[in-house]
């Protein structure tokens, strides 16, 4: 059981039913990733996010920040491509 009282299986099943009703396919782990990245982007410390997610190591949590950097890099490249196309 998690601290909230719901097992992972129960939460996963409920999430799947919500996604089916909405007609979307989003894995519950993607929701966890999105939550972690949202916290990091809001300036919450890696240590606080680590504790929230229950990671034993801050290194594991740091991966969320690195993934966010890759997303930021992709957005910057896309913005530059757009700028280059419109400046011609």
Image: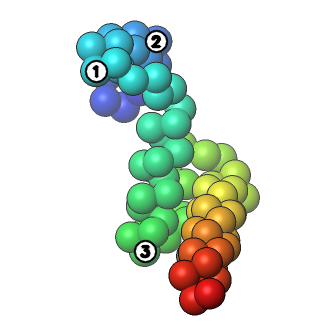
The crowd level at tag 1 (other Cα within 10 Å; few <14, some 14-19, many 20+) is few
The N terminus is located in which quarter? top left
Q: Nearer the viewer, mark 2 or mark 1?
A: 1
Q: In percent of the image, x 65 and y 47: which residue is there?
A: 56
Between residue 76 and residue 8, name the one nearer to us: 76
Q: In the displayed structure, would residue 74 be above or below residue 5?
A: below
Q: Is residue 12 left or right of residue 23?
A: right
- Residue that carries the numbered disc 2 in the rendered image: 9
Q: Position of residue 39 (x, y in %)?
A: 42, 61
The crowd level at tag 2 (other Cα within 10 Å; few <14, some 14-19, many 20+) is few
Mark earlier in primary sequence (2, 3): 2
Q: In percent of the image, x 42 and y 49: which residue is there?
A: 35
- Disc 2/disc 1 C-alpha distance (Å): 20 Å
Mark earlier in primary sequence (2, 1): 2
Q: In the displayed structure, would residue 58 be above or below residue 79?
A: above
Which SS class for mark 2? helix
Q: Is residue 22 left or right of residue 85?
A: left
Q: Position of residue 51 (x, y in %)?
A: 50, 52
Q: Position of residue 80 (x, y in %)?
A: 63, 80
Q: Position of residue 76 (x, y in %)?
A: 61, 76
Residue pushed farthest bottom? 87
Q: In percent of the image, x 28 and y 21: which residue is there?
A: 22
Q: In percent of the image, x 54 and y 64: which residue is there?
A: 47
Residue 73: image quadrant is bottom right
The C terminus is located in which quarter? bottom right
Q: Is residue 83 left or right of residue 41?
A: right
Which SS class for mark 1? helix
Which SS class for mark 3? loop
- Residue that carries the numbered disc 1 in the rendered image: 22
- Residue that carries the numbered disc 3 in the rendered image: 43
């Amino acid at each position: 059981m998690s601290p909230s009282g719901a097992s992972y299986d129960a939460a996963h099943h409920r999430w799947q039913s919500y996604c089916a009703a909405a007609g979307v396919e989003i894995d519950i782990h993607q929701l966890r990733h999105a939550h972690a990245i949202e916290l990091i982007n809001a300036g919450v410390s890696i240590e606080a996010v680590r504790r929230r997610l229950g990671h034993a190591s801050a290194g594991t949590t740091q991966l969320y920040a690195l993934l966010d950097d890759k997303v930021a890099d992709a957005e910057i490249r896309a913005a530059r491509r757009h700028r280059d196309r419109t400046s011609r």
